[in-house]
Image (cartoon, rainbow, N blue to C red):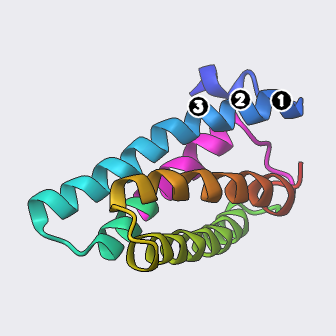
């Protein structure tokens, strides 16, 4: 863990780059879980999307506090995590609404819809985490 902690970035560009690297990894977990649940468990695409999103969000939080953001807004980690979960739930709402609109209303297949949705939610997540959770 000291490999991660040693180099917490202070510059905006470094934070964006690191958040992007973590985002690619956690989006892969999110996307992979969604595909597995749909193809092999027969899950509905909205349920599978929500489960994948939750898996990715928890891993994203852990990696974000280790490698991207300094703690600072909250003195206790549980308040920080609660705030993170709150904004992640807002992100989940954006995720689910985007998927619903793209797939059911727009007729887009769930895979390209998820790719588009990940981009929108990632932008929301970075801004909300940087300024509202970690107060950078």
Across and down, in percent, residue 6 comes to: 72, 22
User: Which segment is the magenta one?
Assistant: 54-72
Asked whether the viewer can see residue 9, the reply is no
Across and down, in percent, residue 60 comes to: 55, 48
Residue extending farthest to the front is: 107
At horizontal 76% and vertical 42% (from top left) the residue drawn is 69
Q: Quadrant of residue 19?
A: top right
At horizontal 65% and vertical 75% (from top left) the residue drawn is 86
Label 2 crowding class (10 Å Cα cut-off): few <14, some 14-19, many 20+?
A: few
Main SS, magenta region, reads helix
Q: Are marks 2 and 3 in contact (CB under 8 Å)?
A: yes
Location of mark 1 (residue): 13
> Which is nearer the eye, 86 or 16?
16
Q: Secondary structure at mark 3?
A: helix
Across and down, in percent, residue 20 comes to: 63, 35
Does 69 sit left or right of 22 as displayed? Answer: right
At horizontal 47% and vertical 70% (from top left) the residue drawn is 102
Q: Secondary structure at mark 1?
A: helix
Was residue 132 drawn as part of the magenta stretch in this picture?
Answer: no
Q: Kindly identify which numbered label has been placed on residue 24.
A: none
Does 12 sit left or right of 94 as displayed? Answer: right
Q: Is residue 5 above or below residue 72?
A: above
Q: Are marks 2 and 1 in contact (CB under 8 Å)?
A: yes
Location of mark 2 (residue): 17
> Which is nearer the eye, 102 or 19?
102
Gap in Å between the C-alphas at discs 2 and 3? 6 Å
Q: Secondary structure at mark 2?
A: helix
Gap in Å between the C-alphas at discs 3 and 1? 12 Å
Location of mark 3 (residue): 21
């Amino acid at each position: 863990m000291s490999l991660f902690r040693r180099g917490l970035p202070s510059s905006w560009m470094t934070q964006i780059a690191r958040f992007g690297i973590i985002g690619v990894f956690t989006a892969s977990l999110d996307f992979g879980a969604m595909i597995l649940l749909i193809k092999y468990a027969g899950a509905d695409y909205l349920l599978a999307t929500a489960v994948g999103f939750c898996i990715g969000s928890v891993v994203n939080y852990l990696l974000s506090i280790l490698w991207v953001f300094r703690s600072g807004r909250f003195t206790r980690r549980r308040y920080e995590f609660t705030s993170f979960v709150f904004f992640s739930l807002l992100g989940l709402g954006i995720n689910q609404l985007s998927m619903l609109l793209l797939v059911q209303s727009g007729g887009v297949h769930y895979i390209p819809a998820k790719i588009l949705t990940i981009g929108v939610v990632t932008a929301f997540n970075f801004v909300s985490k940087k300024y509202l959770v970690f107060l950078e």
